[in-house]
Image (cartoon, rainbow, N blue to C red):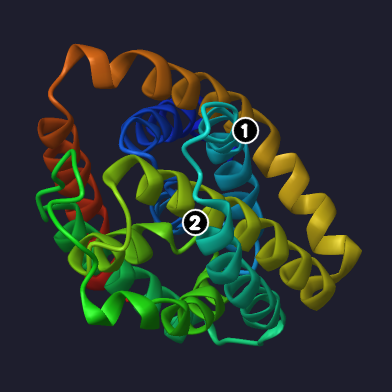
Amino acid sequence: MIGAVPVLLALAFAVTALLYASVGFGGGSTYSALLALSGLDYRLLPLVSLACNIVVVAGGSIRFARSGLTPWKKALVIVALGAPASFVGGLTPIKEATFLGLLGGSLILTALTMLIPVRAEAGGMPTRAARFMPLAAAPLGFFAGLVGIGGGVFLAPLLHLVRWHEARGIAATASLFILVNSLFGLAGQLLKNGPGLFGAALGAALPLLIAVVIGGQVGSLLAARLLPPQLIRWLTALLVLIVGVRLLLGV
C-alpha cells in the first residue's frame, strides 16, 4: 500500500497536518480515513494515526506550556479522566465494519465542529455547565482510543460552548488532551495487537511521520499567519467532510 502511492499519500498527510496544526488539532481521524481509503489493514490504522497525532501536537503542547497559556489545574483534571479511558478504548476489540463506520461518522461530526465560530476571547463568565466538563473526558477518551484519534476536536467546541476558559487556554487544553490520549490510546492498541502488527505499522508510518512533521511545523508556524483562522477551519472542514463521506460510502 505505502509503496504504491508514497508521494500522494505522504502529501495528503502533510496537508492534513498543516491544516489541523494551524487550528490546534492533530488530525488523527483524517489520517485513519486516508489510510483506510488506501487499503491498509484496518488494525494498523489507529497505530499509525495516533503516532502521527503525537508528532503533530507535541510541539504545540510544549509551546503552549512555555507561553504560560495552559490552565494546568483545570486541564489536568480533564486529561487525567480521559487518558485511562483512552487506554481502555485502545484495548477494546472492534470489527472492521464497525470501526470504519465509527471513523466515518466521527469525520462528519468533526467537519461540523470545525464550522462552529471560535471567538478570540472568552466572551463572559463560564456557564453553570462548565463545571461538568470533566464528565465528558472519559467517553471522549474511550472513543479516541478505540478509533485512533485524540478527541480534542470534540472537546474544544464543548469547552467554548460553556465558556470554560479563554480561547487560547482551551486550545492549549485540547492540544494536551490530544497528546496524552494519543499516547495512552497507542499503548492500548499496541497491547491489543501485539509486536507483529507494531512492526508492520512502524514500516508504514515512517514516511508518513516525516510528512506530518513537516506539515505540522508549517501549519503551526506559518499557515495561521497567512490565512484567516476561520478560513483555515472551513478548508479543514471541507477536507474532512469529503474524506468522511467517501469512507462511509465505501463501508
Evaluate whether residue 89 shows in this view.
Answer: yes
In this view, which residue lies farthest toward the right? 195
Judge from the rendering whether residue 150 lies leftward or rightward of residue 236; answer left or right: right
Mark 1: which secondary structure? helix
Callout 2 amino acid: Gly
Q: Is residue 215 above or below residue 181?
A: above
Judge from the rendering whether residue 7 lies leftward or rightward of residue 188; answer left or right: left
Residue positioned 20% across, 62% down in the render: 125
Quadrant where the N terminus is found in the figure: top right
x, y percent for residue 85: 63, 81
Judge from the rendering whether residue 144 lies leftward or rightward of residue 122; answer left or right: right
Per the image, the residue denoted by label 2 is: 39
Quadrant where the C terminus is found in the figure: bottom left
x, y percent for residue 244: 25, 61
Q: Earlier in the sequence, mark 1 or mark 2?
A: 2
Res 80 quadrant in image: bottom right
- Tell me if mark 1 has few (under 14), some (14-19) or many (20+) residues whose alpha carbon lies within 10 angstroms of its own: many
Per the image, the residue denoted by label 1 is: 209
Callout 1 amino acid: Leu
